[in-house]
Amino acid sequence: MKKRIEKYFSKAIDAIKEVLADGSTSKEIPREYQGYIAAFGSSVLQMGFLPTLAVYADQDSGSAEHRHKILLVLAKTIHGTIGNQLSNDVKGALTGTAEHFFAAVAQKDSLQHELKDPLLDAAVAVKLCLRTFKLTKP
């Protein structure tokens, strides 16, 4: 496995526990999140970076679980792993809500270029780390 993905593992597990498991220690995650994170990378390749972020930032999508939580997990994973290597603009974008994250990235092309690869790497790490959690049906 590539080192650039492995470095995200510990922070990905922490972010999953905090955001998707709502801080509980039961390690139970709704099954829908596995599909959401699995579709993230292919969505970026097919639809593009910004359209994918727009879909995932939408809090009123009517989906079974809140898809915007995936963006929060990715943001926390990136910020916790390589936050000290990122520009202040990116750090600011990573610490807000999913809507704030999308708005900040949409406004600056430099943020899009700086975040695309780390987001895809973090998505792979989160996808792999989700396998260590018990996935529950709604």
Image (tube, rainbow, N blue to C red):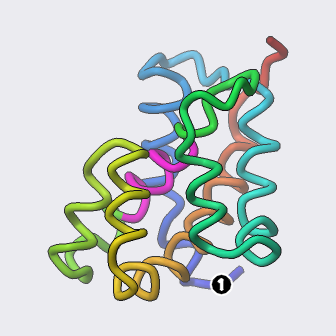
Nearer the observer, 102 or 135: 102
Left or right, 118 with respect to 79, comes to right
* Amino acid identity at mark 1: Lys
Nearer the observer, 103 or 20: 103
Residue drawn at (37%, 58%) of the image? 103
In the image, residue 66 above or below residue 123: above
Residue drawn at (77%, 78%) of the image? 45
User: Which residues make up the magenta segment?
Assistant: 70-78
Expressed as whole percent of the image width and height from the top left, the position of residue 40 reads 72, 59
Tell me the residue that label 1 is attached to: 2
Residue drawn at (77%, 41%) of the image? 34
Left or right, 81 with respect to 66, comes to left
Name the image quarter holding residue 60: top right
Expressed as whole percent of the image width and height from the top left, the position of residue 91 reads 23, 66
Name the image quarter holding residue 38: bottom right
In the image, residue 88 above or below residue 97: below
Q: Main secondary structure of the magenta part?
A: helix
In the image, residue 62 above or below residue 70: above
Residue 42 belongs to the span the image colors magenta: no
Residue 76 belongs to the span the image colors magenta: yes
Expressed as whole percent of the image width and height from the top left, the position of residue 127 reads 71, 54
Expressed as whole percent of the image width and height from the top left, the position of residue 124 reads 68, 65
Residue drawn at (61%, 24%) of the image? 27
How many numbered marks are there?
Answer: 1
Left or right, 44 with respect to 110, comes to right
Q: Quarter holding the C terminus?
A: top right
Q: Quarter holding the N terminus?
A: bottom right
